[in-house]
Amino acid sequence: MANQDQKKTKIKQPNSRHCFVCGIENPCGLKMSFYEVEPGHAVAEYTVTERYQGYPGIVHGGIVAAMLDETLGRAAMVGDQKHFRVTAKVEIRYRKPVPVGIPLQLHGRLGRRRGKLIFASAELRLPDGTLAAEAEGLLVDLPDQIADQEQLETLGWKVYPD
């Protein structure tokens, strides 16, 4: 029952067309989708294919970093999906090898705010809940915000059906 209630409260965040992580038309991209589950908390579930492995059967660390970086940004975007920020600093700790071909859970949480700065954290967990990688990041407001809905549509920034 709790899982059903949690599914009802998920709000899908927009995707773009060409972003490496969330771009739905990027032929080399991950095409990940993110959801808001509560204030300051964004989640994603994703299975990485062999295409993105480093060592045989293991997700390349750069792909893990990209997923965590996007998750940090998505946590900062909860409740304000048109407010873009860029990563100023990120620290990643790789705890366990991340296997390809299994469903991974990513959680991003908003930390404190200080003016145009936002601190956030992200976790990548294996199906059994084991922490495989984590990140802490500092994000800053994008200097030239895209506020116009027409510009956003041109960039493909919208919620696409699952």
Image (cartoon, rainbow, N blue to C red):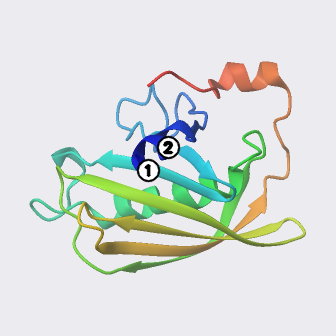
Amino acid, disc 1: Ala
Count the marks: how many? 2
- Residue at x-position 53% and y-position 37%: 8
Residue 47 rendering spot, x and y as whole percentages: 27, 47
In the rendered structure, find residue 5 and report the number of the disc placed on it: 2
In the rendered structure, find residue 158 and report the number of the disc placed on it: none
Residue 42 rendering spot, x and y as whole percentages: 57, 53
Quarter of the C terminus within the rendering: top left
Closest to the observer: 15 or 61? 15
Dot 2 crowding, Cα within 10 Å, few <14, some 14–19, many 20+: few
Q: Which residue is mark 1?
A: 2
Amino acid, disc 2: Asp
Viewed as shown, does residue 69 lie left or right of 105?
Answer: right
Closest to the observer: 119 or 42? 42
Question: Which residue of the protein is positioned furthest toward the right in this rendering?
Answer: 115
For the residues bearing labels 1 and 2, Cβ distance under 8 angstroms: yes
> Splitting the image into 4 quarters, where does residue 146 fall?
top right
Question: Which residue of the protein is positioned furthest toward the left in this rendering?
Answer: 56
- Residue at x-position 30% and y-position 68%: 129
CA separation, marks 1 and 2?
5 Å
Q: Is residue 102 above or below residue 120?
A: above
Viewed as shown, does residue 46 lie left or right of 97?
Answer: right
Looking at the rendered structure, the secondary structure element under dot 1 is: helix
Q: Is residue 138 above or below residue 71?
A: below
- Residue at x-position 37% and y-position 48%: 45
Dot 1 crowding, Cα within 10 Å, few <14, some 14–19, many 20+: few
Viewed as shown, does residue 52 lie left or right of 81?
Answer: left
